[in-house]
Image (spheres, grey):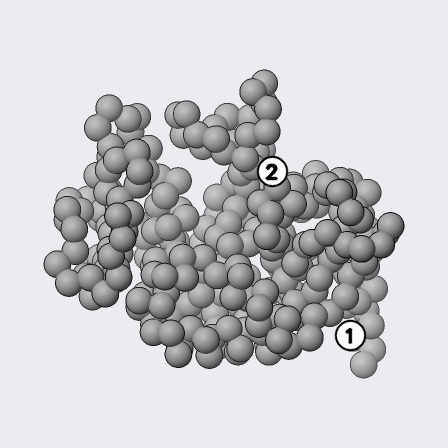
Amino acid sequence: MNPIADLIADSGRVPPQRLAKPVESTPFFDVGPEGFLMLPPAGGRLHYAPGAGLALANPPDRPEGDLLPFAWSSGFAAAAWFDGRVPLRANAVRLTDGNLILIASDRDDLQEGMAVALSETFGLAVSDAPVVIDPEDASRVCTNGRPITQRRTRKDADAPPVREGARRLQLDCPTIDGLAVHPCVAMISLGDGRGPEADLKDLPLMASVAEIRKHIFMPLVGTAIWGEDTISAAHMVLANILPILRYGLPPGAMPSAELASDLMAQLGARFRERETR
């Protein structure tokens, strides 16, 4: 397994206007034997072709590099699907022992907020979504190597946007290397809890399958490349191999240094318990 970042170098090609024989076509993308073509709402084109890397056509009247955030998200994910791996809409956090945990949630603000809280509280390196996992060996993960971003929540935020006019801000946290394959020990799914305290619990198999399915990145693109049956089988394989834990936050709570410390303590106890079995 090689890093996906190796596959998406800018080739200098001119992207096609549309794909000739797409398996799936929408107003925003085509996918088929010729690869993946993205048509961002602001204009421009991004084309990934297996073995040929990325081709970018910048939108008119936009700053140079305007498509790079799409290259490291949608282009990165498309390359993963074509390479037989699964992109997940999750952030990664590297623990002090070198292992990664993945942080996922139905809400971006919880997912990104917890990754940032873990980084700021413990000095841990983090990575922006998506990440890519090997369905044949779920302990092996590639990140896109990009700095973590968060959606802008106030007008006076001092972090720079990822591109001119963007609603997402790029934060100054240590970043996980995108040019390496990393060991992964668990995915943490965040959600509102029902009690006054945060709690961590293992999910049963069918709930784990549902979590994997919810956090797949660009599922229509993956299905067009792999087929529905293969995608469904990958959900089951990943849920069987990758430990998936639910961390229920107190109702209405947002990630904080206190919750990050609690999560790390509960994870440490859980890992020690597994080692003694």
Q: Is any atom of residue 200 visible in this view?
A: yes
Reading the image, the residue beneath label 1 is: 274
Spot occupied by residue 181 in the image (x, y as percentages of width and height): 50, 62
Q: Identify which residue is drawn at 34% across, 51% down.
A: 75
Label 1 crowd (10 A; few <14 / some 14-19 / many >=20) = few
**Residue 51 is at least partly visible in this image:** no
In the rendered image, the vertical position of residue 132 relative to residue 114, given as above or below: below
What residue type is disc 2 on?
Answer: Cys
From the image, tell me which residue sits under label 2: 173
Q: Of the residues under marks 2 and 1, which one precedes in the sequence?
A: 2
Of all residues shown, which one is farthest toward the top? Answer: 156
Q: Secondary structure at mark 2?
A: loop
Residue at position x 20%, y 61% in the image: 22
**Residue 156 placement (x, y as % from top left):** 58, 18
In the picture, the quarter occupied by the C terminus is bottom right
Residue at 52 percent of width and 66 percent of height: 213
Q: Vertically, is 239 above or below 54?
A: below
**Residue 220 percent across, percent down from the top left:** 36, 61
Q: Residue at x 78, y 75 (%)?
A: 275
Distance from the alpha carbon under mark 2 to that under mark 1: 30 Å
- Dot 1 amino acid type: Arg
Is 81 or 24 nearer to us in this picture?
Answer: 24
Give the residue furthest to the right.
196
The local crowd at label 2, few if under 14, some if 14 to 19, many if 20 or more residues have their Cα within 10 Å, is some
Instruction: Please state, as top left, top right, bottom left or bottom right, where the N terminus lies in the image.
Output: bottom left
